[in-house]
Image (cartoon, helix red, strand yellow):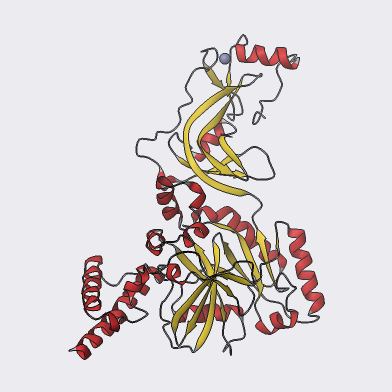
Amino acid sequence: MSEQARNRIERLVRELNEHSYNYYVKGAPTVSDEEFDRLMGELADLESGHPDLVPSDSPNRRVGSDLSGSFPTVRHDVPMLSLDNTYSEADLIEFDTRLRRDLPGEDLVYLAELKIDGVALSLTYENGLLVRGVTRGDGLQGEEITPNVRTIRSIPLRLREPVDRCEVRGEVYLTRETFNAINKEREQRENTAAGSLKLQDPRLVADRNLSFFAHGLLTPQPQHDRHSESLERLEQLGFAVNSERRHCSSTDEIVTYWRAWDRGRESLSYEIDGIVVKLDALAQQARLGATAKSPRWAFAFKFSSERVRTRLLKIALQVGRTGVVTPVAELEPVLLAGSTVSRATLHNAEELERKDIREGDTVVLEKGGDVIPKVVAVVESERPAEALPFDFTKTCPVCGSNLARDESEVAIRCVNSGCAAQLKGRNRDGYRGPRTRAGGPAR
Ligand SMILES: [Zn+2]
């Protein structure tokens, strides 16, 4: 009887883990939700009748509740160093020059990968089973949060091939969808991947729907020569590995890749804050080694501007001293580059129409070297059905006169030379007459 139960449990665990893998790692479900729930139910019933037979890779172990108090501190076998990072092309060229000097006459091939905005995690597997999940901490020792890590469904509890012992490193992150969902319910400060991962109750962590990309494999005897091959190996073992990566053999190629993703990052379902550039050959990595803080063969090339999403509540019109009307976004207050932002410039009518920014939209804000935050894009998938294109055929918000489009079609202005907004500007600034060129953004 017990033998029969054991066989059925093992079979169900294998089958359910395969379905989970197809769903959470491959993104291609092979079974209906209904069928999955039915199998989970059958397994839960069997396991509650035979608690001694519950295997450590049972999917029911993903929602344990055996964690309490603080997390134990664990020393990393191999330190989790941080990467040198920069925002500038000059630093990138210097990095490349240093490597060519230290490895004279050798071919250098880099692998550029996306830098996921999440929190670093180390996973240890023994005999193919997940035994430990540890945060980066200070790089030398981190916190062991295994029960929480088990709740992350894209992390395999059992590798797809038996491996005696290995350590996998990667990044835990929140998809934008999950982030937005949590944001609606809870305070913002704990809505990061880091905050979620360290919640005291694993059941709450399971609710957070965290995701994981693996990006590093440490094994006692690696069977491969290149970092890119270790990523392929991670895929074989059952991990989700980001499919966006590119081999580059010059700094020009790296810069091109970096620029393309700085522009294209809004198309991703998760946040990235730059690219990571690594020397692909493991032998070259080993020869270069590391400083006390960071490896000499890798580099984070970050995007220079911070971006954040928020709701655009209203488009207000501001009238400047030349009569030019500047649309201004009034926003749901949001933290961006260290300060709370509730207004952003929309520059001019032409730009607002080109980007088709509407009241009620979710917009992407950016603050670069510039102090003034600007709206760089609209998230069209989150546009409310009732949001209409902004209508400029309005009257001056200050004097009520008609607004007219100037010759360049870029700006809209109030044509009333007696408009209070214009008179006020003239008096204050010692204004002596209209400028010859229609202005750009009012600053
Ligand atoms: Zn006016």
Q: In the image shown, does 256 or 436 lie closer to the viewer?
A: 256
Q: x, y (%) of residue 267? A: 49, 55
Question: Is 368 on the left or on the right of 270, as rendered?
Answer: right
Image quadrant in which the N terminus is located: bottom left
Image position of 375 with respect to 138: above or below: above
Q: x, y (%) of residue 437? A: 69, 25
Q: Answer yes or no: is residue 423 visible.
A: yes
Residue at x-position 24% and y-position 73%: 44
Residue at x-position 51% and y-position 55%: 192
Image position of 271 with respect to 322: above or below: below
Image position of 330 with respect to 85: above or below: above
In the rendered picture of this protein, how many numbered marks are placed on residues?
Answer: 0
Q: In the image shown, does 279 or 66 lie closer to the viewer?
A: 66
Q: x, y (%) of residue 225? A: 62, 86
Q: Quadrant of ligand 1?
A: top right
To which quarter of the image does residue 327 belong? top right
Residue at x-position 66% and y-position 72%: 278
Residue at x-position 70% and y-position 70%: 294
